[in-house]
Amino acid sequence: MIPDRFYLVYTLIVLQGISVQCRKRGHIKPHEIDENLLSQRCELLCLLRTSEKCTCRHNLSELSKKPGRCPNSTNSILEKICLDDCKEGNDYECPGTKVCCKQDCGYSCQDAVGLEDDPDLPSIPFNISVSERRCNGKMCEISWKIHQNKAQMLPVFFVVETRSHVGNVFSQRKLSPWQWCNFQKMAEVLDHATMIKKTVVSIKLKLGLWYQIRVAAINKYGYRGYSNYSEEFRLTDQNHDAEPKPPRPPKNLKAYPIGYWPNDTVVARVTWSAPKSDLPIDRYKISWARHFNDNVSLYLYHDYVKEPKTSYEITNLQRDSLYYVQLQAISTNGRKRLKSSNESRMLDTTTDVLLNPSEANALLIEDEAEIRYQFQPSKKYGMLVRVSSDCSFNGSFVELCCGTDDCETKEYGAVRPRKDQIIFSKLKFNTEYTLRVFYRNSVRRKEITKTFVTPQCEKFKKSHPNLSIKC
């Protein structure tokens, strides 16, 4: 048995050593949660193995079984259906406290039984409450209680998760998926009369969001499940809801010309990075106006760009001119819009370099360049897309994205450029892509945009029968 004094120090090491950061909303899946819980069990075992080298991160076979057992057969119709939810003996392919159970045909994930009677598992935390909601650097104190049993004498790791949504009125259906959160332990008090231990921690939250919290206790043997979630709450400031602040101005704002239209007007590109914000950014407002002798034109143009896109192309600009460009980030708190201050840049479309015959011929080749696509089989990747052109790709910048509208969500970034061709190795079948090639020289930037659709998987496989492809 581990002495109480050693236990308190040991638990503190576990809490601070392997806690994890909050994940982004909407990017967590049930099996990922179980993989993280499995990793925490590994860490706990490693702490106990002081006399030998810990290899549990590389060999997880001893932790593949979850606590509990499969329920008795009910001879239901569902058990006669052939399922392949998991592999035999690998319970961590099942979400939550479910275990992998054999059926008449195949294996399925089912709720484990006997967890409440397992003396080696820590109790489920209860009475999850928010003990301090005041906005103090966006920190919030929460507490929970847990029954002190035999399993609590072993090192225990507490997992804290939150889910939230934006808005002035709480709505259960708007809540995000559960997210792991980092926390800082504040206090731990044991009531010897009832053998109930209270733990107080501090977590960092965002203003303007509704939250719910749940907690799980895990040791080297596993866990019994998560607690009931807390009541919904928001951060408060002096007994009032703490209002979220407007977003900060967009970062890394740049504006530069990229080419000319046939009507001799200039097209320019504006790029930026998303700023920090209490609430998610909804869209950006971009404005531009021509600049005359320190005075801005009365003709002010503006447009809106939806998040997550962070670029915009301005067309029909005049040559040899200065333009004043402003950008503003906008988020929404209920019916109220929160706007950042404007970030501004000057855009110069002035060109002092005259075209000589050789430069003019080079630009003409770029304007008339033909881009060709070839879909070739590959034993390693399945399909290669080879892009070739009459002019060289040397010194050019290449973008490839799905669809035709949003080229900011670059699905494919690993380009292998050659002098006269580019090879893409991991594109999807039956998908439309947009290819943008930006040529640069001393006179201007020229952009060529082409779209193409990859072949259907079945047809491509039929054309190449010796190729092993799963469609």
Image (cartoon, grey):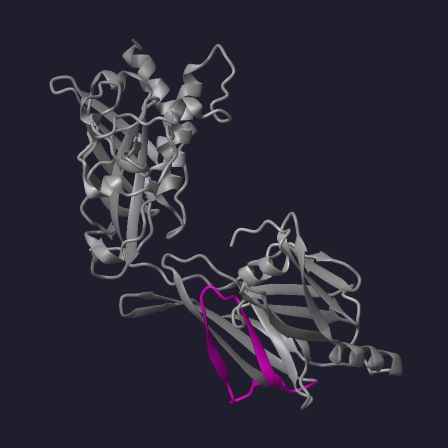
Q: Which residues are magenta?
A: 293-319
Q: Residue at x 18, y 36 (%)?
A: 75
Left-right relation of 221 to 149: right
Quarter that holds the N terminus: top left
Residue 182 within the magenta-colored segment of the rendering: no
In x, y percent, where is residue 289?
55, 83
From this view, report whether residue 251 is shown above or below residue 132: below
Q: Residue at x 23, y 57 (%)?
A: 173
Q: Residue at x 25, y 26 (%)?
A: 69
Q: Nearer the viewer, residue 170 or 141?
A: 170
Residue 296 within the magenta-colored segment of the rendering: yes
Q: Nearer the viewer, residue 394 or 182?
A: 394
Q: Residue at x 80, y 62 (%)?
A: 419
In x, y percent, where is residue 73?
20, 32
From this view, report whether residue 121 is shown above or below residue 309: above
Residue 254 position by quadrant:
bottom right
In x, y percent, where is residue 40?
39, 29
Left-right relation of 428 to 438: left
The single residue placed furthest to the left in the displayed view is 193
In x, y percent, where is residue 227?
22, 36
Q: Looking at the image, can residue 181 be seen?
A: no
